Structure formats: C-alpha cells, structure tokens
Image (cartoon, helix red, strand yellow):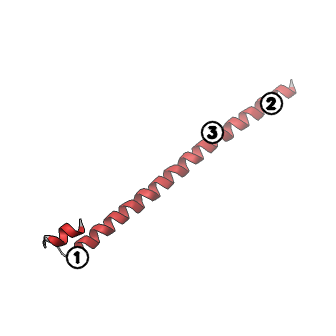
Amino acid sequence: MALAIIGTANHWWIDAAAAAMIIVGSIAIWRVGSVALARRRATRDGLVQLEAFANANALDADVSRS
C-alpha cells in the first residue's frame, strides 16, 4: 500500500505513516476488546460454576439434616 501511494506521487510519506498508525491502532483496539470479552466470559463461567457448587453443597446440607 505504501509503495502504491508513494509510487503514484499522489500523496506524501506522511499518508503512509498515518495509514500504518491507523492499522496499528485498530489492531490494538481489537485486542483490548477481545481481552475484555474473554474476561467477561470467564467471569460469567466462574459464577455459573460457583452457583452450581453452592447449590450442590446446599443439597448435601439438606440431606444430612434429614
């Protein structure tokens, strides 16, 4: 892309540098978003496991009382 921009002489080097910064910035935003979503999924899965564990212990306590 940079060679096409510079080769056609329609733009300056700064255009290629700006495009590179936009690409790098977009990748960084995508990675931060994917990490945030993975953490949210892990938290939700952890809460489901914790709830299942608590419910199993509550059932065991009810059975031992009877």
Residue 65 in the figure: left or right of residue 51:
right
**Which amino acid type is shown beneath numbered disc 2?**
Asp
Indicate left or right for 10 with 18 as reference. left
Q: Residues within 10 Å of mark 1 (few under 14, many from 20)?
A: few
The residue tagged 1 is 13
Residue at the image position 50 percent from the left and 55 percent from the top = 35
Q: Measure the C-alpha gap from mark 3 to mark 1.
A: 53 Å
N-terminal of the pair, mark 2 or mark 3, is 3
Q: Quadrant of residue 30?
A: bottom left
Locate the N terminus by quadrant.
bottom left
The span from disc 1 to disc 2 (Cα, nearest Å) is: 71 Å
Tell whether label 1 touches label 3 (CB within 8 Å): no
Residue 45 percent location from the top left of the image: 60, 42
Mark nearest the camera among 3 and 1 is: 1
> Closest to the observer: 35 or 5?
5
Circle 1: residue type = Trp
Three-letter amino acid code of the residue under disc 3: Val
Where residue 63 sits: x, y (%)? Answer: 83, 26
Residue behind mark 2: 60
For mark 1, give the secondary structure: helix
Residue beneath disc 3? 48
Few, some or many C-alpha atoms within 10 Å of disc 2 (few <14, some 14-19, many ≥20)? few
Question: What is the quadrant of residue 51 in the picture?
Answer: top right
Asked which quadrant contains residue 2, the reply is: bottom left
Along the viewing direction, whichever of 41 and 59 lies nearer the viewer: 41
Considering the numbered disc 2 on the image, is that residue within a helix, a strand or a loop?
Answer: helix
Q: Is residue 12 above or below residue 28?
A: below
Left-right relation of 66 to 57 = right
